[in-house]
Each structure stands twice: as C-alpha cells, then as structure tokens.
Image (cartoon, rainbow, N blue to C red):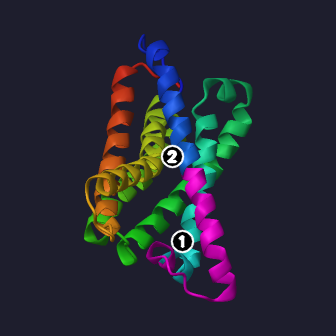
Amino acid sequence: MTESAGPAAPRYLRPLTAGVGVLLLVIVGFAVVRVVTDWPHILDGTVPADDFAKRYVAHPWFGYLHIVPGLVYLLGAPLQLSRRFRTRHYLLHRRLGRVLVGCGVLSGLLALVMGVLYPWGHATESAATVVFGTWFVGCLLRALWAIRHDDVPIHRRWMIRAFAAATGIGTIRLWVGIFTAIVLATTDVETFPERVTFGIAFWLGLSINVAVGEWWLRRTPDLDG
C-alpha cells in the first residue's frame, strides 16, 4: 500500500511504510523463534515444555504449511504493491502475483485449520481466526477474480485489503507484549493468563489492521492500477 493518486499520500506514505516494515520484522522474528524452538523437538520426537510450541510440534505439517507460505506472501506482497516494481518488471509482477496468491490462500486455509482445531487462545482465538482468516482468503480470491476480468483498480484494492489483514499477525504480537507488560507491572501474579489475552490480542490486532487498510483505501479513492 505504497501508492496513491490522492493528495494525502505524501503525508501518510512514510509513516505507513515504516509501520508495515516494523510489523514485517516482528513477523519474521517470531517465525525464526518458532523454527529455533520447534524443530529440535520435531526432529527428536520430544515434547516441548512450552504450551504454545506444543501444537506446532504435534502438527508440523499444518503449522509450517501455514508459516512458510505466509512468509513468502508477506515478503513478496510489498513488491507487488509498488508502482515502480510493476512498471519496470510487469511480467515478473504477474508471475510473482500468481505465486503469492497461491501462497496466501494456502497459508490462510491452514491458519483456519490451526485456529479452529488447535487454538491456543481458546474460543476467542478460534472465532477471530474464522472471521479474519475467511476475510483474508476472500480478499485474495476477489482480487484474483478482478484481475482475470481486467479490472486492475478493483484488483489492487482487494490486494491491499488482504495485505492489511495479513500484517495483523505482527500487530497481534505487539498487543501480546503490551498485555504482558501491563500485567507484570501492575500485579504480583506468577502465572500470567496468556491464553486469554492471546485471543483478545487476535481480535485487536487484526481489527486494527483491517480498519487501517480501509482507511487507506478511503484516503486514496482514485487508485488507477
């Protein structure tokens, strides 16, 4: 979401781009933590002490067919939304787009599986996963439908919506950190109820990102592809 024909783009472009960059770094960082934490147990057939890691170790195919394609999508999507990249490398843009949509849909579907069948944040996480996972996959499929009908502006708008939702994974982690800091600073509890706040963080993080995506689209109504 780095392009706009609207007058607000120069003012909001840099902070928005910086925010997206921070979220991508957070997501990549947590993916690295997952690999470092999970794979020794996956390879050795052992059970981790960390409750959060247990579901990834117990269901590595579901977990990593969500994580790896999701990372490919998230790291490639900013290029796809760049006017300069599209203009200079149009054929690559089209080919990469097919790959990224496939990765995004696969990751989104596996997110639904993990969030519904193996939720860590209880029913709150499951409900958020169904709502926003369905929204994300639906955005990608709607964008694909639009480009197949040569409707580039509508295609771009739905791709922006999908990317905004996907980067909410990073915002979730920021909210988890905020909740943890508040509880540890204001109480003497030894066991922090992370499962409860994790589900709440899902709703907050994804709702905020979807709302920001819609705000951006309203500020830039003249996207011309």
Q: Main secondary structure of the magenta part?
A: helix
Give me the disc on residue 63: 1
**Amino acid of disc 2:** Leu
Who's the residue at 28% across and 63% down the image? 188
**Magenta segment, which residues?**
27-54
Q: Residue furthest front?
A: 188
Label 2: few (<14), some or many (≥20) within 10 Å? many
Rendered view: 52 above or below 154 = below
Q: Residue furthest bottom?
A: 45
Nearer to us in this view, 154 or 208: 208
Rendered view: 84 above or below 104 = above
Q: What residue did someone put label 2 on?
A: 144
Mark 2 or 1, which is nearer the eye? 1
Nearer to us in this view, 31 or 86: 31
- Does the segment drawn in magenta span residue 3? no
Mark with earlier residue (2, 1): 1
- Does the segment drawn in magenta span residue 51? yes
Taking the image as shown, residue 70 lies to the left or right of residue 173, namely right
Q: Position of residue 95 (x, y in %)?
A: 69, 44
Within the image, what quadrant is residue 48 found in? bottom right
Nearer to us in this view, 51 or 111: 51
Taking the image as shown, residue 213 lies to the left or right of residue 87, namely left
What whole-number distance in Å separates the C-alpha atoms at marks 2 and 1? 25 Å
Who's the residue at 41% across and 52% down the image? 177
Q: Is residue 161 visible?
A: yes
Q: Position of residue 156 (x, y in %)?
A: 49, 34
**Amino acid of disc 1:** Gly
Rendered view: 26 above or below 194 = above
Label 1: few (<14), some or many (≥20) within 10 Å? some
Whether pointer 2 and pointer 1 mark residues with C-beta atoms closer than 8 Å, the reply is: no
Who's the residue at 30% across and 61% down the image? 197
Who's the residue at 73% across and 38% down the image? 92
